[in-house]
Amino acid sequence: MSETIQIHANGEARSLRRGTTVADLLRDLEIKTERVAVELNLEILDRAAFDRQVLNDGDRVEILGFIGGGSL
Amino acid sequence: MTDDRLVIAGREFKSRLWVGTGKYKDFVETQKAIEASGADVVTVAVRRVNITDRSKDNLLDYIDPKKYTILPNTAGCYTVEDAVRYSRLARAAGVSDLVKLEVLGDERTLFPDTAGLIEAAKILIKEGFIVLPYTNDDPIVAKKLVDIGCPAVMPLAAPIGSGLGIRNPYNLKIIMETVKVPIIVDAGVGTASDAALAMEYGADAVLMNTAIAGAQDPLAMAEAMKYAVHAGRLAYKAGRIPRKLYATASSPIEGML
């Protein structure tokens, strides 16, 4: 079994060490977990699950936050 | 007017001017303009976090969610599915159950797709969201939105970012008489008098972004809007004189030579 997996994070391909969790990924990206939402393969992931959710090969992760916008 | 609070779904708001956070030069200007406007409700959009350039600041580092009510919006959503998805993401990002729901009909006008809006609102209300819908100046749609459980409605004054002011004051009047929830005039305000007029007509609040952010001097315009909304509200509560075709002397005739 390969040591790395391929995922897409916000549309970008990334190689990760097998066993990486969502919390690990956010830490690597230097994203504070408060005030972001994570969607894993189109399902919103509960914040409490970030630590235990291990990423798998081919996963699509979306990390969203708040930006300036009014009525666009 | 200290007791003249705006209450929506049991939440109390001090300011009747609500502002957007788009189109500013930078976060410092955004922060200063919001401060100058006196607004306590600030609307924000939900987008992908920039993961390649982490040096970029976060908007919420500049707008303290403890000080302001953060109102996530679904700006840019053209389908019911997208609007529902973005609302759920906004809630998951942990600010609140509030959402300014936009389901847009077309890119040129950014007018709401009111059929989609009602459908999305129904889904979200069932999931416990407090839905503040951005809607057309249509009294029938406003009533339907209230009937399904929206605690306020946000009819437009004119197309988003157009600065045209209130294009259909009579429809807004009818909406105000038809529904018994707060009316927040959202979008289309160009300058201070537009905001004052909306409040004089009886709107409970005004939400704007471009009118402030796009002004030559956004901080000065933010302050102008604060006074306009306040003045308009005071005038509405004071009760204006009826319009008459002919003059009525304001000085007595008695005592004249």
Image (cartoon, coloured by chain):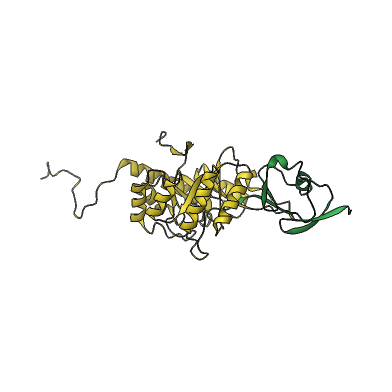
Q: Is residue A8 visible?
A: yes
The residue lying furthest to the top in this view is B3
The residue lying furthest to the left in this view is B257
The answer to which of B255 and B244 lies nearer the viewer is: B244
Q: Is residue B62 visible?
A: no
B103 lies above or below A35: below
Q: In the drawing, does residue B189 fall left or right of residue B241?
A: right
Q: Residue at x 36, y 58 (%)?
A: B168
The answer to which of B253 and B172 lies nearer the viewer is: B172
Q: Quadrant of residue B190?
A: bottom left
Q: In the drawing, does residue B120 fall left or right of residue B48?
A: left
B240 lies above or below B5: below
B7 lies above or below B143: above
Q: In the drawing, does residue A8 fall left or right of residue B70?
A: right
Q: Colour of chain A?
A: green
- Percent position of residue B98, x then y: 54, 44
- Percent position of residue A50, x then y: 73, 43
Quadrant (top left/top right/bottom left/bottom right) for the N terminus of chain B: top left
Count of marks, rendered view: 0
Q: Colour of chain B?
A: yellow
The answer to which of B47 and B104 lies nearer the viewer is: B104
Quadrant (top left/top right/bottom left/bottom right) for the C terminus of chain B: top left
- Percent position of residue A67, x then y: 62, 51
- Percent position of residue B49, x then y: 68, 52
Q: In the drawing, does residue B141 fall left or right of residue A41?
A: left
